[in-house]
Image (cartoon, coloured by chain):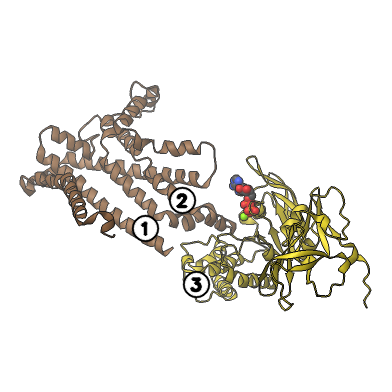
Amino acid sequence: MYVELKDINKNYGNFEASKDINFGIEKGKLVALLGPSGSGKTTILRMIAGLETPDSGEILIDGEVVNDIPASKRGIGFVFQNYALFRYMTVWDNIAFGLKVQKADKEYIKQRVDELLTLTNLKGFEDRYPTQLSGGQRQRVAFARALAPNPHLLLLDEPFAAIDAKVRQELRSWLKEMIEQLGVTSIFVTHDQDEAIEVSDQIILTNKGRIEQIGTPLEIYQNPETAFTAGFFGKGSKLDYPQTFRRFDIPEGVDDLLVRPEFVEVTKKDEFQKYSNSVSEGTIVEAEFRGDWIELKVDVDGNVINARRAPEAEPVEVGERVNVLVYKLLVTENDKARILYNESVREPVVVI
Amino acid sequence: MHEETTGGKVVKVLLIALTFVFVFLFLVLPLVTVFKEAFSQGWAAYQRAVTDSYTLKAAGLTLEATVFAVLINTLFGLAAAWSITKFEFRGKKLLTTLIDLPVTVSPVIAGLIFLLTFGSQSILAPLLRDLNLKIVFAVPGIVLATVFVTFPFISRELIPVMEAQGTDEEEAAALMGAKGFLIFRKITFPQIKWAFLYGIVLCTARAMGEFGAVSVLSGHLRGKTNTLPLHVEILFNEFQYVPAFAVASILVILAIIILIIKSAIEQKGAKSSDVR
Ligand SMILES: Nc1ncnc2c1ncn2[C@@H]1O[C@H](COP(=O)(O)OP(=O)(O)O)[C@@H](O)[C@H]1O
Ligand SMILES: [Mg+2]
């Protein structure tokens, strides 16, 4: 493990900002710290950087305990949430700052800054001041500035939050590509599940100062372990009257039942349905075209669930009666989550 | 602005006229009077009054007190603004409130406080006598009084600016390995430069003009513990009107110079915050 946090706790006064934080990150990975606002992501990032001190526990970087090493000596690149660019310095001076502090050779500084300007597509902007740049350009300056001294570890706090939606998408893939190309171990903070899923190799999900789950985006998405994780990912809808769905063996004492759109198949009355013996009937409440799919809300005996249909399928109308098949459910019980399958879907299907 | 919304032309003219009359009566007229009186017996008399050895001594002492006040309050102002805006500690609110005390308390009272603290009646008196340190009715007392009344001027300009800037840029610099003084020089100071200069100008103006506290602590020893404002008072009380107004005119000229510098700084500061 390149970065390791062991039993980290951190309080602000009486407020527990980090509780029993344990995780490890392999070298070269791009990891997302994901969680709702106020869940303690920034606190974790700042402790790794050395800008905050944990109350207890150990932080290891490259096998060495760094708790007592000051931030300035940890060799970490940090991209702040609002970038914190030096407003009285030009883009060039911003990027060169770290190298100048290290008293690097003048020629080398010139060459390195030039390299980074090219890498971040900022050629021609080197004499501008931060306020004369767009949000995306500022983000790239912050990125270049953090990378200039060749850090072993790059930390980014909500790097896309301050950028408008259009540019954000573009910057995401750019950053992912860039980090992969450089091979620098990186941790970025985000509250946006789509961003974490799209960009990261691994997700560390935080909630109320604790870690809920760690895994690849697919693992976490498919197999949420806690009630929080189950609710956080996907567009799950809660079932208020689950007994109406057929062929589910719902145990006693469960807390919640969630169904995600991809667990549901909505078919028109005259369409073929392989598992016709386990469908329920519902009414379309809402049908909206979203480009790649049609977003539906279907009322099944009082449960309003989200579902999708392909845009090229025959359209369904609001008020239309349809067949609803639910393949599986997410069940939460005492803060644990698991998956419950539709019995008929589990049975081997005889293909005719 | 739209005239209908502000009550029409008559009101506008009336308000502007009123302001001008007021400014003329309370500012321009007294200033003109100062110069008129100062030159009432010609240039030679004015020159004699201004170059009089007691006047020069008083000017020297005013300069000394002002320099000390600016230096000490610069150090204090930076330290106070830094600790209040960049650190969290107990008693921060109290400190912020206390810093403003010198502008809320009457200078005469301040003078009396120092008189009691360092005078011959105080518990510190034997210690001061042993150290052979004379504060009351001596130059140190004048300096002390001036420092006291100008205490908050620099920190009060710095605190809001530094508060608004936050600590992100400093943290970013520290993470790249920059040390305290380099961070101050390269990151913090450029942010507070104009506010800082502005504070110095205000501090200078107040220090030069200080009368009340200094008057109590001075003892009015001509040529020893007299500052320019005190000297004006003495001359005036001795019915030496031409010299009194001549010395006063020096203070007026200095005040006008400071006013010009102040507005220049304000303009520069505003412009540099546009560029940011
Ligand atoms: N310096 C601080 N003093 C007091 N409380 C803080 C401080 N920093 C963060 N907190 C609190 O800790 C909690 C977690 O904050 P943070 O780590 O910034 O969350 P996130 O980045 O996930 O939004 C928040 O409730 C915040 O108010
Ligand atoms: Mg945060």
Which chain appears brown? B
Label ID, residue B269: 1
Residue A350 or residue A120, whichever sits in front? A350
The colour one sees for chain A in the rendered image is yellow
Where residue A34 sits, quadrant-wise, is: bottom right
For marks 2 and 3, give the CA distance: 27 Å
- Mark 3 chain: A
- Mark 2 chain: B
Name the residue that disc number 2 marks.
Answer: B162
Crowding at dot 3, Cα within 10 Å, few <14 / some 14-19 / many 20+, comes out as some
Q: Position of residue A214 (x, y in %)?
A: 77, 58
Q: Is residue B23 visible?
A: yes
For the N terminus of chain B, the quadrant is bottom left
Amino acid at pointer 3: Glu
For the C terminus of chain B, the quadrant is bottom left
Residue B201 horizontal side relative to residue A244, left or right: left
For marks 3 and 1, give the CA distance: 24 Å
Residue B130 or residue A227, whichever sits in front? A227
Where residue A322 sits, quadrant-wise, is: bottom right
Q: Is residue B253 above or below residue A281?
A: above
Q: Position of residue A96 (x, y in %)?
A: 54, 67
Dots 2, 1 in contact, CB < 8 A: no
**Residue at position x 36%, y 62% from top?**
B271
Amino acid at pointer 2: Met
Q: Is residue A167 above or below residue B112?
A: below
Residue A308 or residue B59, whichever sits in front? A308
Label ID, residue A126: 3
Crowding at dot 1, Cα within 10 Å, few <14 / some 14-19 / many 20+, comes out as some
Residue A96 horizontal side relative to residue A74, left or right: left
